[in-house]
Image (cartoon, rainbow, N blue to C red):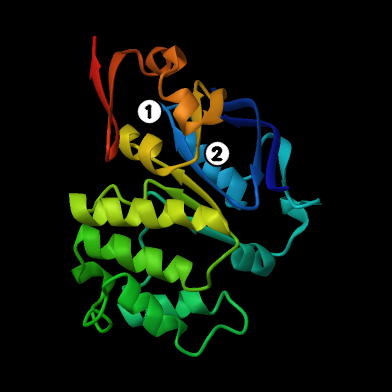
Amino acid sequence: MSVLTAERLVVRRGAATLLKGLSLSLDATESVAIIGPNGAGKSTLLKILAGIETPTEGQVRLGRRSLADLSAAVRARTIGFLPQHFEPHWDLSVAQLLRLGAERGERLPADALKQAIVAFELAGLEPRRWSTLSGGERARVLLAAVLVVDPPVLLADEPAASLDIGHRLDVVEALAARGRDRLSVVVVHDLDLAFSCFGRVVLLAGGQVVADEPAAGLVGDRRLDEAFGVRFERLRTEGGWHLRASR
């Protein structure tokens, strides 16, 4: 059953058209990787799906209701959004950011914040200010602040880009695993992770959906090579897929 639906989205910014009549239906329980070359419209699509930006044409529906008709509070409880870049207006502490994240939810378990701190390895960082955190620490704090309310829909824009290899794998695998009982949609730059961790892969290029397939079906599709303008060599291992690009 579709929980989040994009209908004929068009986004124009000045002379540029970022999305060109894009439609996409996302089910209540699935893990979806969104991939594509730079400028494909990936970040723009996520912002429209989250209700952060408004399309020039078309609409997004959450269930049967237009996302535009829902209050900001309802959207905040239902949709967790992890931006590619985040900078708080005030130099808040980790503890303050986590409490702000928790305030989006209703009737959270008493130990919800503690669980988030443990899950994202934030113990001892609570008094630290945002400005003092490393890129990896910031990414983990933001993940914890968004996921502390366990939203039914998660939209994440390259959430592991600033993490080291170990943490990157842990985060992407955890977000993909949410697809067992939630909707998890993640913009993924690392194609190996996209095809190895997610059940469904949506390929964007030029503001349009070029392919939308189960990961196992799309990994060998030549539309992937055409979209990125390269030739991929594909290798299947016990750990998943490895793609090496060449001209």
Residue 165 vs residue 233, the one in the foreground: 233
Query: Given the current orientation, which residue lies at the most extreme bottom position?
Result: 110
Crowding around mark 1 (Cα neighbors within 10 Å: few <14, some 14 to 19, many 20+) is: few
Image position, residue 203 (x, y; %): 49, 27
Name the disc covering residue 57, or none: none
Look at label 2 and name its amino acid. Answer: Leu
Q: Which residue is mark 2?
A: 45
Residue 9: horizontal and vertical position, in percent? Answer: 67, 32
Label located before the other in sequence (1 or 2)? 1
Q: Is residue 168 left or right of residue 13?
A: left
Q: Is residue 188 above or below residue 156?
A: above
Q: Quadrant of residue 137?
A: bottom left
- The secondary structure type at the circle numbered 1 is loop
Which of the numbered marks, if any, corresponds to residue 38?
A: 1
Residue 88 seen in the current view: no
At 31% across and 69% down in the image, what residue appears? 120
Q: Secondary structure at mark 2?
A: helix
Q: Is residue 172 above or below residue 88?
A: above
- The answer to whether 140 is drawn above or below residue 112 in the figure is above
Residue at image coords 57%, 74%: 104
Q: CA distance from mark 1 to mark 2?
A: 13 Å
Q: Position of residue 52 (x, y in %)?
A: 58, 52
Q: Residue at x 34, y 33 (%)?
A: 191
Residue 145, compared with residue 15, is above or below; it is: below
Task: State the residue lying farthest toward the top.
Answer: 247
Q: Is residue 109 left or right of residue 128?
A: right
Badge 1 amino acid = Asn
Residue nearest the observer in this picture, 133 or 119: 119
Q: Residue at x 65, y 62 (%)?
A: 75
Task: From the top left corner, tell me how far across and down residue 88 is, in percent.
Answer: 38, 66
Q: Compare residues 238 and 149 and report the one nearer the observer.
A: 238
Classify mark 2: residues with Cα within 10 Å, few (<14), some (14-19) or many (20+): many
